[in-house]
Image (cartoon, rainbow, N blue to C red):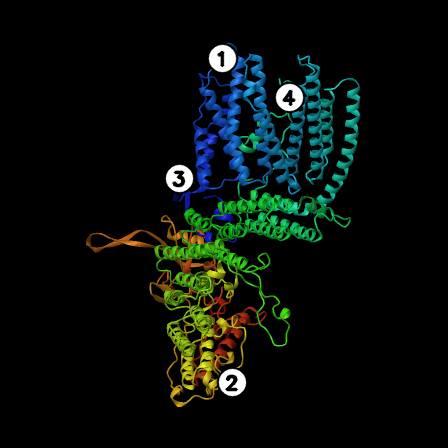
């Protein structure tokens, strides 16, 4: 989908291994984005775009250039832009190639005027370039909607617009020379000038507020170009429309035109002054702030000369004095702004330098010093439109270096290509975090309360408010468009600002509406640029629920889930798709609760469903106003809100039905997902849909229909039953939720008499107790014993990850042993409160059998309130102490589970253990298991299973890669299919794309397992897991190291061997024969003393160390 998706997606667990599903040509297919872009670049480089431009300039109808490479390039860009977001550089290349192609096609189809061929040829070229620029500017407008914080993209767009206006002026000039009447009237110059002015204002707002310090050269070029445009416009106003050369002798018309031009000229000069002030306020590095005065002096002198040349006599002197006063005041303001900008630069320079260092380390730095070559003054002076309008003509040589490259293929462009990774993203986030802290401090003091205590950075933020931080976020997005945490931080900041404005304004203002539209646009862009991230899709749905709570449509929320599924990147992640569906239901449920909460209380603007409410308890002897403090007084919903609430209840149930159908069709064997789904639906039905459905079906003052109430309660029970039956064995927390509803919420229904099935409410109370006991017994029989099932397969998931607010909070269940412990404890407590001696004894036996193999250490971090056991004989099995005697310590008595009862009676006591001499079997609780089908096998301690391999991968490829990455390898092999030939002989067929790698050490296996979904072999991300089969059946002794390399063995034989060697080496000056004889005698005496048998004396005939026998050394 994009070359950086496989390398630069941060904090997105669902993206791993699923980036090959992509969308192109309106269907999902797998292709290499990098190769696709390279194919486009090859078409661009095939005939050298610079040569094509020269051929277009020299082209005649008889010899048209070959435009096929450009046509293939434009078609590739068009196809790519429809199906995936492009980077800023790709957008600029797309616009450039489109302009060249359209210009060539236009000239190829045009005909020359025979009366004046040279002039007609130039006019056709200008007309062709103008038409081509209209297409390219449209493409750049789409690019700016995606990356409004890219300064280089803004500059290229502005120069294209100015070039389009320049070609219009050139066409008008040549039309006047030829004598064509009516051409000037066909061109709406005023609308084009307004479009350019608006584009400059947008650029100044996005990149000209001080957040692009180290891109000061580009920002200064934008300001310089804006001022040049104003000077050119002033020359057109004061010169082209001047009445000095007018042939109209009407004095009244001449005076009116003079006043009009005078007003327009003064307005342009005032606008130029504002640009100077804004330019001087911006901190810009790389020497841009030092050269600003030279540019301002030149531009002001040029504008003043144009304006004064329009007047004569005394009026001219008055205007000169006016301009001198304006310049003095303006220069004083500029000097003050430059001092503040210099102080601001000192504060921001460290963060800007960190960003530059990070970009340089990742190889995405744009060399800004050589971007803008000097303009040829001779060509400017020779222009038929004058040197001021000629400044609007685009310098193609400058952009060829950036967009095309000096020599095609020689420059590997990595800037503005979406390759910003974790380091660049973190540098930007540190920058934004610093600015946000200052922004919140300024917001507390008040943006308008500027005092002398404000620092330069605080004053700058008070002037621009959150626009300054938004500009920095957009700059970060243009460099790191696929880094998830940049988008998440950006969206959270916008949401926080939206909530702050809503609390301050208390009404729908234009500022709040603009921020709402901006927030929705940012979330939509984040989903396009990070299609592998579940978090950005979740933020998009919750943002829609936040900003459009009054007119929220459930279909709009559901469309986000459909987009995430149709993109294909999350299609292989059932957890992500189910989670997004549950989040969409949650957003609509919030809308329903807010509607009912604000529509049913008397103070609609003060109490919402997410606020707290006091208990309505009237105490004796307490005043009424104190007793009712914090209590909300309710009223009936009006008809419109009531109808909308009924529709929302139906919509939520329809969304649940759609999610159920999705799970059944797409993932029919995913039991855990069905349990999570039905648990979510049961909770919503019990707490929201069922109570609201009963309340909404009430008529004015009429009693509730008993059959309707019973059916609604049955719907809740049905959901809970499906939840506990969805997974075999069921998770204990599912039963606990079911029991909580039956024992609490269900009791409340019975207490209020809402279930006519039990008209006698006195008999209904023990009925609920019996039903609760029946559910406990069902739960204890359906869950597994402790230690047999625990969701710790993924060691990266924390035991408390269910407390998170992200996908892990909903899709990750609690540890099974900890949940079983809570279920057992609640069961015993229930029997203590509502049972008899016999029922308590039965509960104790059930709990004891379930927790017999319970591992204390596995859930020690989850159990928060351990206690000391009081009766160890009842609480668990007896153990053998160090002396071999029976100990009464319990396995789980110290956790205070059921330590409340005396010694049980004989019929409930456990049978006495009999001591035997039989060898106890080894416990296998700590061994890793590998599940194959429905069976579990112990994992081989030295072997890993490698899947998703390429068919071309060979055995030695696995050996070379895993030995280099992890450590020594004993054997590796690719599993292949067996093919049978004549005579029953078989031989190996093609690869099954899986293999086995057997290591020398156990620790190497753990290192390899950590690279699951990360390691790449032959361009494919492989899956590494444990294997129950070894890679080789017979391993020579010593190939598997029990201890790490270098530790050696600590046997008595080896110690004697080492000591003997030390004695031999240290025998300096001693007779070697005597030393060896002493060593031999010592060894013989030692063996005689141990075996009590006569020793055989052996003599050593050689005196050299090489002839020592093994007996002597041992």
Q: Is residue 764 visible?
A: yes
Residue 368 location in percent, x, y? 62, 36
Q: Which mark is residue 380?
A: 4
Residue 29 location in percent, x, y? 39, 44
Q: Which of the two labelled residues, at mark 4 and mark 1, occupies the earlier sequence position?
A: 1
Image position of 245 with respect to 142: above or below: above
What distance separates the C-alpha of mark 3 from that of mark 4? 47 Å
Residue 774 location in percent, x, y? 38, 76
Q: Which mark is residue 772?
A: none
Q: Give the residue at mark 1.
A: 113
Helix, strand or loop at label 4? It is helix
Q: Which residue lies furthest to the top in this view?
A: 115
Q: Which mark is residue 870?
A: 2
Helix, strand or loop at label 1? It is loop
Q: Which mark is residue 25?
A: 3
Report the front residue among 819 and 986: 819
What distance separates the C-alpha of mark 3 from that of mark 1? 43 Å
């Amino acid at each position: 989908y994009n070359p950086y998706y496989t390398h630069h997606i941060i904090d997105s667990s669902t993206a791993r291994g699923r980036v090959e599903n992509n969308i192109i040509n309106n269907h999902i297919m797998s292709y290499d984005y990098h190769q696709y872009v390279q194919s486009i670049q090859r078409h661009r480089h095939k005939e050298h775009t610079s040569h094509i431009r020269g051929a277009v300039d020299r082209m005649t109808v008889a010899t048209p250039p070959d435009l096929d490479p450009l046509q293939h390039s434009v078609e590739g860009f068009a196809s790519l832009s429809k199906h995936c977001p492009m980077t800023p550089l790709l957008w600029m290349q797309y616009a450039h190639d489109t302009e060249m192609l359209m210009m060539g096609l236009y000239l190829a189809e045009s005909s020359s005027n025979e009366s004046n061929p040279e002039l007609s040829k130039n006019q056709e070229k200008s007309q062709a370039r103008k038409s081509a620029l209209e297409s390219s500017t449209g493409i750049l407008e789409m690019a700016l909607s995606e990356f409004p914080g890219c300064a280089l993209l803004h500059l290229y767009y502005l120069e294209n617009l100015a070039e389009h206006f320049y070609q219009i002026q050139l066409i008008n000039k040549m039309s006047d020379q030829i004598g064509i009447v009516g051409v000037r009237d066909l061109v709406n110059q005023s609308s084009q000038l307004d479009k350019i002015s608006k584009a400059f204002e947008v650029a100044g707002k996005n990149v000209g507020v001080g957040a692009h310090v180290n891109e000061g050269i580009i920002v200064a070029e934008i300001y310089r170009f804006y001022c040049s445009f104003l000077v050119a416009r002033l020359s057109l106003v004061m010169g082209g429309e001047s009445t000095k050369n007018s042939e109209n002798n009407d004095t009244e018309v001449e005076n009116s035109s003079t006043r009009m031009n005078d007003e327009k000229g003064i307005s342009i000069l005032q606008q130029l002054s504002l640009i100077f002030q804004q330019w001087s306020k911006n901190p810009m590095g790389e020497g841009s702030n030092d050269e600003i005065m030279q540019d301002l002096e030149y531009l002001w002198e040029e504008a003043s000369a144009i304006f004064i040349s329009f007047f004569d006599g005394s009026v001219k002197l008055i205007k000169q004095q006016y301009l001198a006063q304006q310049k003095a005041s303006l220069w004083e303001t500029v000097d003050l702004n430059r001092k503040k900008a210099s102080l601001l630069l000192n504060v921001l320079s460290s963060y800007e330098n960190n960003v530059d260092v990070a970009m340089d380390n990742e190889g995405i730095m744009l060399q800004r010093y050589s971007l803008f070559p000097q303009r040829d003054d001779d060509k400017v002076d020779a222009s038929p439109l004058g040197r001021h309008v000629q400044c609007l003509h685009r310098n193609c040589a400058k952009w060829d270096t950036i967009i095309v490259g000096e020599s095609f293929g020689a420059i590997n462009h990595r800037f503005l290509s979406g390759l910003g990774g974790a380091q660049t993203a973190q540098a930007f986030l540190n920058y934004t975090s610093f600015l946000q802290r200052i922004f919140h401090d300024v917001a507390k003091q008040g943006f308008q309360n500027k005092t002398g205590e404000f620092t330069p950075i605080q004053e700058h933020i008070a002037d621009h408010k959150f626009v300054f931080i938004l500009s920095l976020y957009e700059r970060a997005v243009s460099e790191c468009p696929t880094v998830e945490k940049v988008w998440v931080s950006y969206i959270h900041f916008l949401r926080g600002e939206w909530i702050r404005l809503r609390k301050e304004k208390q009404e729908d203002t234009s500022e709040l509406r603009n921020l709402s539209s901006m927030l929705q646009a940012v979330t939509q862009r984040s989903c396009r640029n990070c299609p592998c991230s579940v978090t950005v899709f979740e933020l998009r749905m919750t943002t829609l629920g936040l900003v459009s709570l009054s007119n929220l449509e459930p279909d709009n929320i559901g469309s986000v889930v459909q987009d995430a599924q149709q993109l294909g990147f999350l299609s292989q992640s059932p957890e992500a798709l189910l989670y997004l569906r549950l989040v969409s239901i949650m957003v609509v449920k919030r809308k329903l609760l807010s509607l009912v909460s604000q529509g049913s209380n008397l103070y609609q603007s003060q109490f919402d469903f997410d606020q707290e409410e006091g208990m309505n308890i009237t105490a004796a002897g307490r005043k009424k106003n104190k007793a009712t403090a914090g209590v909300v007084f309710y009223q009936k919903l009006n008809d419109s809100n009531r109808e909308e609430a009924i529709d929302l209840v139906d919509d939520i149930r329809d969304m649940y039905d759609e999610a159920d159908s999705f799970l059944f069709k797409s993932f029919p064997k995913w039991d855990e997902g069905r349990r999570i789904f039905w648990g979510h639906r049961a909770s919503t039905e019990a707490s929201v849909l069922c109570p609201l459905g009963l309340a909404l079906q009430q008529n004015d003052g009429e009693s509730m229909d008993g059959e309707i109430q019973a059916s609604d309660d049955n719907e809740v029970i049905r959901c809970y039953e499906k939840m506990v039956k969805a997974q075999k064995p069921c998770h204990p927390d599912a039963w606990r939720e079911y029991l909580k509803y039956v024992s609490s919420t269900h009791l409340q229904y019975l207490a209020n008499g809402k279930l006519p099935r039990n008209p006698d409410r006195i008999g209904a109370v023990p009925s609920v107790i019996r039903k609760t006991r029946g559910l406990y017994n069902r739960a204890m029989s359906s869950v597994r014993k402790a230690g047999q099932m625990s969701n710790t397969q993924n060691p990266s998931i924390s035991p408390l990850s269910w407390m998170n607010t992200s996908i892990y909070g909903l899709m990750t269940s609690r540890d099974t042993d900890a949940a079983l412990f809570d279920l057992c404890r609640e069961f015993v407590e229930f029997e203590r409160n509502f049972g008899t001696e016999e029922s308590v004894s039965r509960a104790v036996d059930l709990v004891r059998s379930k927790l017999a193999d319970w591992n204390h250490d596995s859930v020690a971090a989850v159990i928060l309130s351990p206690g000391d056991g009081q009766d160890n004989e009842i609480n668990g099995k007896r153990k053998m102490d160090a002396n071999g005697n029976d100990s009464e310590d319990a396995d789980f008595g110290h956790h205070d589970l059921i330590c409340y009862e005396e010694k049980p009676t004989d019929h409930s006591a456990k049978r006495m253990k009999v001591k035997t001499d039989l060898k106890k079997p080894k416990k296998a609780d700590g061994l890793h298991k590998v599940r194959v089908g429905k069976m579990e096998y112990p994992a081989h301690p030295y072997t890993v299973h490698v899947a998703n391999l390429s068919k071309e991968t060979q055995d030695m490829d696995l050996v070379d890669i895993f030995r280099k990455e992890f450590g020594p390898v004993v054997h590796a092999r690719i599993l292949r299919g067996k093919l049978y030939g004549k005579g029953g002989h078989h031989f190996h067929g093609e690869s099954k794309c899986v293999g086995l790698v057997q290591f020398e050490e156990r620790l190497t296996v753990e290192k390899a397992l950590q690279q699951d979904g990360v390691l790449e072999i032959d361009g494919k991300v492989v899956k590494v897991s444990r294997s129950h089969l070894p890679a080789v059946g017979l391993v020579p002794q010593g190939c598997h190291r029990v201890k790490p390399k270098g530790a050696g063995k600590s046997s008595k034989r080896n110690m004697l061997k080492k000591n003997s060697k030390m004695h031999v080496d240290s025998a300096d000056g001693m007779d070697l024969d005597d030393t060896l004889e002493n060593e031999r005698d010592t060894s013989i005496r030692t063996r005689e003393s141990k075996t009590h048998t006569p020793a055989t004396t052996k003599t050593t005939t050689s005196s050299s160390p090489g002839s020592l026998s093994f007996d002597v050394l041992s």
